[in-house]
Image: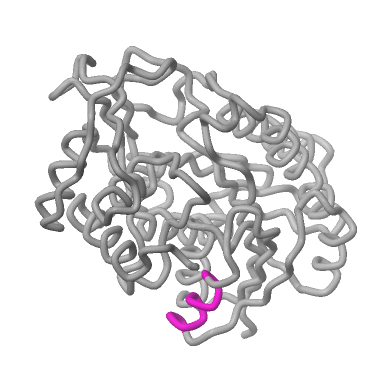
Amino acid sequence: MSKQTILVTGGAGYIGSHACVELLQAGFKVVIVDNFSNSKVESLVRVEKITGQTPTLYQADIRDKQALSDIFAQESIHAVIHFAGLKAVGESRQQPFNYYHNNVYGTLVLLEVMNEANVKRLIFSSSATVYSESTCNQYAEDFPLGAINPYGRSKEMIEHILRDISKADTVNKSVSPWKIVLLRYFNPIGAHESGMIGEDPNGIPNNLLPYVSQVAIGKLEQLSVWGNDYPTIDGTGVRDYIHVVDLVKGHIKAISALENQQFAAGNCKAYNLGTGTGYSVLEIINTFEKVTGRPVNYKIAPRRAGDLAECFANPALALAELDWSAEKNLDDMLIDAWRWQTNNPQGYQ
């Protein structure tokens, strides 16, 4: 039996490169589309070293319909995992046009090409930022949506689009209806245990952990902790952190679910990918110092507008329907992140 081919958009990025490793090791053929706006070719050289296999690479932008159409004509694609997009909350407030053009328009082009090629299995990289603010700190998939920044809104818009096209196909009795899984990520951190691939942000990191590790290694001077007066265990914000390898294993499970008879044609279902446990910023810093033996210089700064006190996943649905749960603990996440940082002090440079 020939290998199923999975198209991975944004496959050279942080999460995408880890997904490529897991897909190749699970026996899939991997085709990558990436424009390298926020990723490096070197990550794919490392993927090949880890797996002993070479994914097929097309350097292209998902907004380029002709390029995508050519790829679908060239490759026999079974399903698509769609990571490609811009992903920084703060930057999205400053550059909303770029976020809507890259994320929403780019997805529309991809969907148009998939529809024309009759490839209708899709795993979409969504986000916990699609949820509205809630008095309950543990978010379940049936909570109201209501993103509060352009990045989150771009993901929420795409979710609505995907639900609409899957419903329309069912009503129209399409020959081959869509089957779509929306995976809502909480906070991916960590790196591959080899230390060969990891998070390599352009410029100053937007996320907590690469900032912490860059301060610990001396690349950055000091971390700002935004607020210490929240109603939490130590006054700092609490979030659900998940190891990136656990996260991408959820995508392998999602591909299996699409093949399952219980996942009906025309389905578009959302699942949280998180651990279900929240850790505060100071808990992250203190645990990082404990497992690495390196001090992290930080200061308390005023709260940022729009930041929640606590936010973590209810991952029960993913366990029940995808047979997926996170396996790695906080120590594992931080040790692997530090191994990547020490092995690659300048990232992929």
For the stretch drawn in magenta, what is the main secondary structure?
Answer: helix
The N terminus, quarter of image: bottom right
Q: Left of 302 or right of it: where is 156?
A: right
- In this picture, is 196 found above or below 35? below
Q: In the image, what residue occupies the spot 73% across and 29% down?
A: 97
Could you tell me residue 140's position as x and y percent? Answer: 39, 29
Q: How is the image coloured?
A: one colour
- Return the residue nearer the eye: 347 or 196: 347
- In this picture, is 40 found above or below 110? below
Could you tell me residue 339's position as x and y percent? Answer: 27, 66
- In this picture, is 349 found above or below 330? below
Q: Residue furthest right?
A: 66
Could you tell me residue 240's position as x and y percent? Answer: 30, 37
- Return the residue nearer the eye: 65 or 346: 346
Q: In the image, what residue occupies the spot 42% across and 68% down?
A: 197
- In this picture, is 132 found above or below 86? above
- Kindly indicate the quadrant of the structure image that contains residue 74: bottom right
Q: Left of 307 or right of it: where is 349?
A: right
Could you tell me residue 44's position as x and y percent? Answer: 55, 73
Q: In the image, what residue occupies the spot 63% across and 62% down?
A: 8
- Kindly indicate the quadrant of the structure image that contains residue 114: bottom right
Q: Magenta region: which residues? A: 43-51
Q: Left of 223 or right of it: where is 185?
A: right
Q: What count of labels does the image hold?
A: 0
Does 173 lie within the magenta span? Answer: no
